[in-house]
Image (cartoon, grey):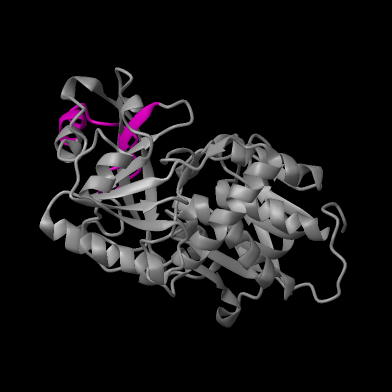
Amino acid sequence: MEKVDITIIGAGVIGLALAFELSKDGRNVLVVERHPKFGQETSSRNSEVIHGGMYYPSDSLKAKTCVEGRELLYAFCREHAVPHKRTGKLIVAVSPQEVLDLENLYKQGLANNVEGLSWLGQAQVKAAEPNIKAEAAICSAATGIIDSHRFMQELQMRARQRHVQFAYNTEVTAIAGEGEGFAVTVLDKPDGNFTFFSRVVINAAGLFSDKISAMAGVAGDEYKLKYCKGDYCRVHNNKGRFISHLVYPVPRKEHSGCLGVHATLDLSGSLRLGPDAEYVGAIDYNVPADKCKVFYESVRSFLPFISLEDITVDSSGMRPKLQGPNEGFRDFIIRDESDKGLCGFINLVGIESPGLTASLAIALMVKGMVADFFPGQKGFSLHSS
């Protein structure tokens, strides 16, 4: 049976960041992806925002990996010429109750050691963004935007330079414990089924990570994903020129960790609204035409320069959430499952926002786990017997 040191299931931004980081140690790394190329699901259907890290409980993986990952991401972009921009972000309150909620969010951001946070009163908001309406705002100077495709492309290229192998159009169909590792069976289109041995298997399968986990023998409600759809609309008539920051509303508690319909600029200066949040039973990327009116009503209180005629439907994405509707906060699952008898199986389940921002920090965290499985050993060649 052919052997490999590390198999990464999934070539989204997390799988690519893992391949980039884990290949530095000279291990033989294989990335298995069921799609014909990288980043075809959550990683390419998002706001492309580099987050500050103020939204999450201080001791959570989401907070820690977001704050650490943000600076790692900016450094990577500078070193490898990945297009990005530190735009800054305003989180705005438009009523007295929202001001109180905004104050609590500001305290959370300070507790999370988010750099570059400041409180803006009404006059300061007007000076920073003359065309928006708000009673108060948090300014997150560390927030930015990134060309996520170029980022993923760069991760893949750097990993390939260190001899990482990528198997696209290849779907994992079985994972079984075998000695000190796993027999992994894949359906390789068009060649059929193929089984190989991997000392370590890392589940970075995004929307299907709970199914891969169950395939390896780890299932249950704790790991069950709920699909949360987020639609986007595009704002035309050069309305992007009316703002220079990203502009977010105060998050609503009932949105289960979603940040509300917000305004984001891309690197060309084009303006987009979204995402919203709707739990769905199946993956569906269609955007209903009536979302234009819904989004207009959502943002008109703080973006008065946008009219309904400016808005058209754009795209949508799926978030792999661990919490369901109206449920409390759920953190990333990043876990070595050795205590379940799966020595060398590492689960990454529920990696949603801020996963893009946190990707390089998550890769470093997993790298520390992987090191425990190769104490002084040399790696396999993929074609050794």
- Residue nearest the observer in this picture, 348 or 381: 348
x 85%, y 52%: residue: 383
- Residue 172 seen in render: no
On screen, 170 above or below 114? above
Q: Is residue 178 above or below residue 311?
A: below
Q: Find residue 284 and report its image quarter.
A: top left
Q: What's the residue at 67%, 49% (across, down)?
A: 31
Q: Is residue 318 visible?
A: yes
Q: Horizontally, is 32 left or right of 277 in the view? A: right
Task: In this rendered view, identify the residue nearer to me: 236 or 137.
Answer: 137
In the image, what residue occupies the spot 36% across and 41% down? Answer: 246
The quadrant of the picture occupied by the N terminus is: bottom right
Q: Nearer the viewer, residue 259 or 20?
A: 259
Image position, residue 213 (x, y; %): 51, 64
- Residue 278 belongs to the span the image colors magenta: yes
Q: Quadrant of the C terminus?
A: bottom right
Identify the residue at the far bottom of this view.
339
Q: Which residues are magenta?
A: 270-294
Give residue 338's quadrant in the image: bottom right
Position of 116 compared to 80: left or right?
Answer: left
309 left or right, relative to 225: left
In the displayed structure, 78 sits above or below 236; it is below
Residue 200 is situated, as x and y percent measured from the top left of the image, at 69, 65
- Figure disc tally: 0
In the rendered image, residue 178, in percent from the top left (x then y), is placed at 70, 70
- Residue extending farthest left: 96
Q: Is residue 347 a member of the stretch shown in magenta? A: no
Q: Where in the figure is residue 326, as x and y percent of width and height?
A: 21, 63
Q: Going 73% across and 71% down the picture, which residue do you hit?
A: 371
